[in-house]
Image (cartoon, rainbow, N blue to C red):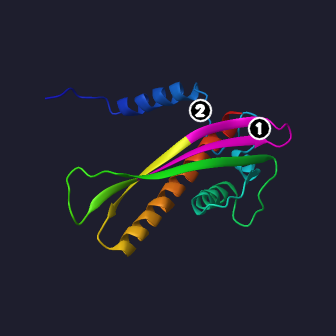
C-alpha cells in the first residue's frame, strides 16, 4: 500500500507552483505589451500588401482576418510584405496505380516595416507541409490540390499572425 497523504498536500503544491510562476515575466500574447500598448491594437495597425497570385491572396486574406477586427479598416502604422514559394512533391512509399500521396510545401518569407521610421521591425520565415492524395479522377486531383493550397495558406497566415503578435507582446 502507498503512503497516506495529507488532504491539503495538493493545495499546498498548487500554492507553491503559483508563487514560483508569479516571479516569471509571463505576458499574455494578446494582452498589453511591454510598451503599454494592446497587442490587438498593434495588430490592427498592420497593412498587408495586396498580391496578384491566388495563393498569396489567400494568405493575405487570412492575415487580414486574423489581425483586424471585422468591419475595421486596416491600419497604416506598419506594412507587412511577404513572398511565397510553393511546390508539390511525391510521397509514394509503395506503388499503387489508383492512389499516390503528394506533399504540398509552402515557404513564406515576411517582413514587417514601421512606416514612421522605415525600419524593418520584424522578419522571419515560415512554412507549411500539407499531404493529399492523387486519384485517377482529374477533377478530384485538381480539387485536392486546391484544398491543400488553402490549408497551407491558412496555416502560414495563422503562424505569421502569431509571430507578429509575439513580437508586439515583447516590444
Few, some or many residues within 10 Å of mark 1 (<14, 14–19, 20+): few
Q: Is residue 122 magenta?
A: yes
Q: Quadrant of the N terminus?
A: top left
- Residue shown at 73%/45% (left/top)? 38
Marks 2/1: CA–CA distance: 15 Å
Q: Is residue 6 above or below residue 104?
A: above
Along the polypeptide, which appears first: circle 2 or circle 1? Answer: 2
Q: Is residue 131 shown left or right of residue 157?
A: left
Numbered tag placed on residue 167 in the rendering: none
- Answer whether residue 29 is visible to the viewer in this image: no
As drawn, 100 above or below 171: below
Extreme residue toward the left, this view: 1
Q: Residues within 10 Å of mark 2 (few under 14, many from 20)?
A: few
Residue under numbered circle 1? 36
Q: Position of residue 15 (x, y in %)?
A: 47, 30
Bounds of the magenta segment? 104-125
Secondary element at tag 2? loop
Q: Are marks 2 and 1 in contact (CB under 8 Å)?
A: no
> Left or right of 103: which side holds 170?
right
Circle 1: element type: loop
Residue 33 visible in this rendered orientation of the protein: yes
Residue at point 28% right, 59% down? 100
Prevailing secondary structure class for the magenta stretch in the rendered image: strand
Closest to the observer, 132 or 71? 132
Residue 13 sits above or below residue 141 on the image = above
Image coords of residue 160 (percent x, y):
60, 46
Coordinates of residue 84 in the picture (x, y in percent): 58, 49
Q: Which residue is mark 2?
A: 26
Q: Quadrant of residue 7?
A: top left
Q: Position of residue 114 (x, y in %)?
A: 79, 40
Image point (61%, 28%), residue name: 25
Amino acid at each position: 500500500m502507498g503512503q497516506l497523504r495529507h488532504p491539503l498536500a495538493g493545495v499546498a503544491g498548487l500554492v507553491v507552483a503559483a508563487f514560483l510562476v508569479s516571479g516569471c515575466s509571463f505576458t499574455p500574447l494578446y494582452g498589453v505589451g511591454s510598451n503599454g500598448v494592446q497587442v490587438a491594437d498593434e495588430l490592427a495597425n498592420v497593412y498587408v500588401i495586396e498580391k496578384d497570385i491566388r495563393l498569396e491572396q489567400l494568405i493575405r486574406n487570412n492575415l487580414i482576418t486574423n489581425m483586424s477586427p471585422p468591419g475595421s479598416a486596416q491600419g497604416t502604422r506598419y506594412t507587412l510584405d511577404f513572398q511565397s514559394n510553393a511546390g508539390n512533391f511525391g510521397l509514394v512509399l509503395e506503388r499503387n496505380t489508383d492512389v499516390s500521396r503528394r506533399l504540398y510545401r509552402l515557404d513564406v518569407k515576411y517582413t514587417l516595416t514601421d512606416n514612421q521610421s522605415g525600419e524593418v521591425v520584424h522578419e522571419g520565415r515560415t512554412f507549411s507541409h500539407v499531404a493529399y492524395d492523387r486519384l485517377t479522377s482529374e477533377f478530384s486531383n485538381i480539387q485536392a490540390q486546391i484544398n491543400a493550397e488553402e490549408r497551407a495558406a491558412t496555416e502560414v497566415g495563422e503562424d505569421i499572425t502569431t509571430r507578429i503578435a509575439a513580437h508586439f507582446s515583447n516590444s
